[in-house]
């Protein structure tokens, strides 16, 4: 009896060790989150403090400020995951 979820000719079940041993590159993700937050924050500050700015620049500053906060939150989550894996 064949499993309808498995395409014909494909083995059933897990065939290797990759899903059990796969590891995410958390340090790279942490570095990218921090660099993204730093860049977005710097551009947001520049956009929000510019003199005689058009309206779109204000919107850009707000959007980049939100992205900077998201990057910092992601960095916090990743750093906690790294600390928990060392555990």
Image: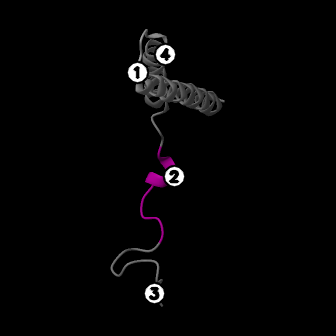
Q: How crowded is mark 1: few (under 14 residues within 10 Å), some or many (20 or more)?
A: few
Q: How far apart are marks 4 and 2 (CA)?
A: 47 Å
On screen, residue 76 above or below 11: above
x, y percentage for residue 72? 56, 25
Q: Name the residue under label 2.
A: 20
x, y percentage for residue 71? 52, 28
- Most extreme residue toward the bottom is 1
Q: How far apart are marks 3 and 4 (CA)?
A: 62 Å
CB atoms at circles 1 and 2 under 8 Å apart? no
CB atoms at circles 3 and 4 under 8 Å apart? no
Q: Sequence-wise, which precedes: disc 3 or disc 4?
A: 3
Q: Sequence-wise, which precedes: disc 2 or disc 3?
A: 3
Is 39 or 43 nearer to us in this picture?
43
Image point 46% across, 78% down: which residue? 5
Q: How crowded is mark 2: few (under 14 residues within 10 Å), some or many (20 or more)?
A: few
Q: Mark 4 points at which residue?
A: 48
x, y percentage for residue 65? 52, 24
Query: Under tag 4, what secondary structure?
Result: helix
Q: Sequence-wise, which precedes: disc 4 or disc 2?
A: 2
Residue 54, numbered label = 1
- Corner quadrant of residue 66: top right
Image point 48% across, 22% down: which residue? 37
Q: Sequence-wise, which precedes: disc 1 or disc 3?
A: 3
Q: Nearer the viewer, mark 4 or mark 1?
A: 1
Residue 2, numbered label = 3
Q: Distance between the residues labelled 1 and 2?
A: 53 Å
Query: Under tag 2, what secondary structure?
Result: helix
Q: Which of marks 1 and 2 is in front?
A: 1
- First to last magenta residue range: 13-22
x, y percentage for residue 43? 42, 17
Q: Which of marks 4 and 2 is in front?
A: 4
Q: Sequence-wise, which precedes: disc 4 or disc 1?
A: 4
């Amino acid at each position: 009896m064949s499993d309808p979820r498995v395409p014909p000719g494909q083995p059933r079940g897990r065939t290797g060790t990759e899903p059990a041993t796969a590891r995410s590159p958390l340090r790279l993700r942490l570095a990218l989150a921090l660099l993204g937050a730093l860049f977005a924050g710097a551009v947001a500050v520049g956009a929000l403090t510019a003199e005689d700015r058009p309206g779109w620049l204000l919107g850009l500053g707000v959007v980049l400020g939100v992205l900077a906060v998201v990057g910092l939150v992601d960095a916090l989550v990743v750093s906690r995951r790294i600390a928990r894996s060392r555990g």
